[in-house]
Image: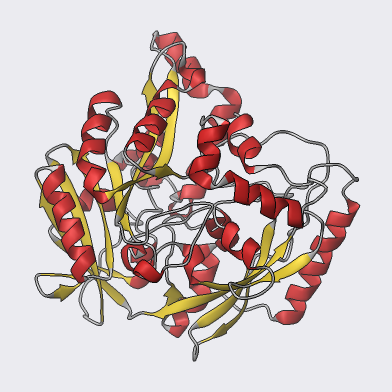
Amino acid sequence: MQTIGWQAHRDAVDRLVRSHAAIPAGATVRLAKRTSNLFRRRAATDVPGLDVSGLGGVIEIDPASRTAQVQGMCTYEDLVAATLPHGLIPLVVPQLRTITLGGAVTGLGIEATSFRNGLPHESVLEMDILTGSGEVVTARPDNEHADLFFAFPNSYGSLGYAVRLHIELEAVPPQVALRHLRFHDAQSATDAIDTIVASGEHEGVRVDGLDGAAFTPDEIYLTLATWTHDTGPTSDYTGQQIYYRSLQERTSDLLTMHDYLWRWDTDWFWCSGAFGVQNPSVRRVWPRRWRRSDVYHRLVGLDQRFDIVGRLDRRAGRPQRERVIQDIEVPSEQLPQFLAWFDAEVGMRPVWLCPLRLRGGAEARPWPSYPLDPDRTYVNVGFWGTVHVGDDAPQGPTNRAIESKVLELGGHKSLYSEAFYPRDVFDRLYDGANLAAVQRRYDPAGRLTDLYDKVVQTQ
């Protein structure tokens, strides 16, 4: 992918600002954007949105300083396509190709490098943000807009939209060597996580990426990734082979860096099975270009629109389904207890495991909208699917129970999907008082939707 340069970027920002001015006074400001990686409803509106055309590229890359200037709507697929020819990648590359850099910062991205590089917003040096008042401000950790810089992660557009981000990059070799370690219980897997995170290695070999999957209570895998210049045959999981199954089928693997970064996307972890794409007969005729998370996401949208699965369930006499699509974080020492509870009360498997720590340890920056203990290792648990619960499915009983358990264990959850917290609990978890203060400064007329109203009240 070619970089677009500064003039094209300035032209796009001018269009964006003009589109903000064209929105009627008093109307809510939102993006004019068809696609989304969110799994919560967006209220329908006839009010025009912000024109983000031309804001989906890489402005420039500086290989010497290992940094890039990137537009907010640039997908990680396009960002990696621009940086990888220089032997560079973002410090954290979320698993799905069409997640945008701005989305991963104003939301929360995570991946296997998060145990050493934290979350995507921690490698941002500065941001240009379109505020609710229509002004574009440059926010850095050391300037007059530092309050916006630090509150922005996990604000989901309630404080504005990033139009430019200056980010750090990491030098990488062409290949990635994988080791899949099996554990027979959650406690031994947790002990291994803590040891690897503390030492950065396993059996004397450096670990650059760490994640895993729990298939059953006694079949848990951790995948240890090591950046390498080793040559040899590499695996291809964009064809007939399926990546998540390889964890059970082999103890080591070799991927290109490109294929490692997108190893989960082809089958959206394991969710492609819901569309029949893991059936070998279907897979052979399903075009390779459609084996992507964004295609599956559109299929989910069609199902929600036309209630296809619900109609089939009713015809078959099956209980109504509740959609359970969540990423949560619990302190690593609480992981065995959470998995035991989840197995007993929810029963969805596999689930994804991804350790993380704030970058910088005890000296980590404060991120008030998603506060994590800088001296603690957390484990993200991701689960995506549906469970049959009956007539109360619309009230979200399973999701509410998960929220309650995560809260009990001192954890958090991402806000890209359903949330049900009472206002006081929500404000305590995500520092609602600070969010409100920052919003008053940059959006005094209240043109942007409050975070609680956006992620809870709209359910």
| Image point (35%, 47%), residue name | 269
Compared with 438, 433 (above or below) is above
Write down the quadrant of residue 5 in the picture. bottom right
| Image point (75%, 57%), residue name | 442
| Image point (63%, 43%), residue name | 451
Task: Give the tally of numbered discs.
Answer: 0
Camera sees residue 84:
yes
Left or right relative to 355: residue 441: right
The C terminus lies in quadrant: top right
Left or right relative to 429: residue 162: right
Give x and y (percent) for residue 435.
Answer: 63, 50
The N terminus lies in quadrant: bottom right
Give x and y (percent) for residue 312.
Answer: 45, 16
- Residue nearest the viewer, comparing 165 with 410: 410
- Residue nearest the viewer, comparing 111 with 80: 111
Compared with 381, 81 (above or below) is below
Give x and y (percent) for residue 80.
Answer: 48, 71
Left or right relative to 313: residue 72: right
Q: Coloring scheme of the render?
A: secondary structure
Compared with 166, 262 (above or below) is above
Compared with 46, 148 (above or below) is below
Give x and y (percent) for residue 420.
Answer: 51, 29
| Image point (83%, 45%), residue name | 48
Camera sees residue 242:
no
Q: Residue furthest bottom?
A: 64
- Residue nearest the viewer, comparing 394 with 199: 199
